[in-house]
Image (cartoon, grey):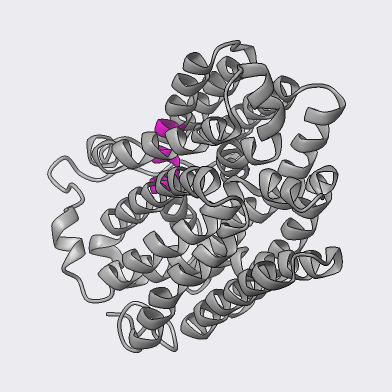
Amino acid sequence: MAVFITSLTETLPAGLLPAMSADLRVSESATGQTVTIYAVGTALTAIPLTAATAGWRRKRLLLASVAGFAVANTVTALSATYSVTMAARFVAGVAAGLAWALLAGYARRLAPAHLQGRAIAIAMAGIPVALSLGVPAGTFLGKALSWQTAFLVMTVLTVGLLAWIGVAVPDHPGRRGGDRPAMLSALRVPGVAPVLFVTLVFVLAHTILYTFIATFLDALGMGGSTDLVLLVFGAASLLSIWVVAAHSNRRLRTLTLASVLLIAVAAAVLAVLSGSVAMVYVAVTLWGLGWGGAPTLLQTAVGDAGGDEHGDAAQAMLVTLWNVAMAAGGIVGGVLLDALGAASFPWSILVLLAPVLAVVLAARTHGFPARRGSAV
């Protein structure tokens, strides 16, 4: 549920962009920067906050990060100005920096060694649930009532989550005072750098289109179907994470290759066949199948490569680069939209996925091994 709240807070503006743009009196490309500023907040703070809070007990840290979402989403819902909305989104990004660096490691600690990969996959299922149910539901609420209502519902869910964590989640100690995560040391561990590179470019490619999906569909004359398109994307993502949960322990590299190739095919379909409504839905299905398990695959790969000694530091760097990519995706997408139009988005994805595919193919022993357990 914490992953769900984090992911939905991050992506909710994608389905609400036109309504938010009108109420905040700014362009849609400017409104898209609400995703960018969120990512900037995460990217700037994930590593320093992870280091500063390394000694905190894990439950206390989880509660603090979730409370940050409650505050930020409430302010976003009540804001009537672009500057206040952007400030609230930055605070939400800071909370996400804490959460993303914490959640995968927390899930690992709660499970026995032979189930740790599946524990991460189950926790990360909050991402496709947010995409398949949360974003379409938020989009529907935005159309039926207002986009502010969607953010207020997020606050209600977050308050409920705080109570649930307090009652049900086991606590774990932080690191000892002198045992702080060493970022540069983690970067030198074989396998960590390839995973971080793939994360940066892969997420950039995805974010360029996802941030402006409502605008892209508007350009195709499908603006009224945004919630349905997102529902199809999310349903395919759920299937993807089920497959990843079942097979990531044995086929990490194969699944990562499949993820990249599925999204590349989806982008190619959108680039040349988007005049057909049916083919748009085919492309979105392939996109969801490729993307749904990607967060689990990347976090599992970097955790395996970093090992027990460098795993937390590697996760913090992954979170930072993930959000650098999201910030860059919002900026690049806005520039592409203004300069070349929405039709340029699928072509940009194809260009970016070429080096991603090359690195995954090359990382046979380290980073993306054929079988988990041989990453280090």
Q: Which residue is drawn at 42% across and 82% down?
A: 372
Q: Residue at x 31, y 88 (%)?
A: 365
Observer-nearest of 126 and 82: 82
Q: Is residue 366 left or right of residue 257?
A: left
Quadrant where the image shows the N terminus: top right
> Could you tell me residue 239's position as x and y percent?
73, 68
Residue lying at the far front in this picture: please name it: 339
Q: Is residue 195 left or right of residue 280?
A: left
Q: Residue at x 58, y 23 (%)?
A: 73
Observer-nearest of 100 and 142: 142
Q: In this view, does 116 lie to the left or right of 193?
A: right
Residue 360 sits above or below residue 170 on the image:
below
Whether 347 is among the magenta residues is: no
Residue 303 sits above or below residue 96 on the image:
below
In the image, the segment drawn in magenta is 93-102
Per the picture, the main secondary structure of the magenta-coloured stretch is helix
| Quarter of the rendering containing residue 280 | bottom right
Instruction: Tell me if I can see residue 36 in this picture.
Output: yes
Q: In this view, does 7 lie to the left or right of 217?
A: left
- Total numbered badges shown on the rendered structure: 0
> Could you tell me residue 2's position as x and y percent?
57, 41
Quadrant where the image shows the C terminus: bottom left
> Could you tell me residue 306's position as x and y percent?
28, 67
> Could you tell me residue 259's position as x and y percent?
56, 75
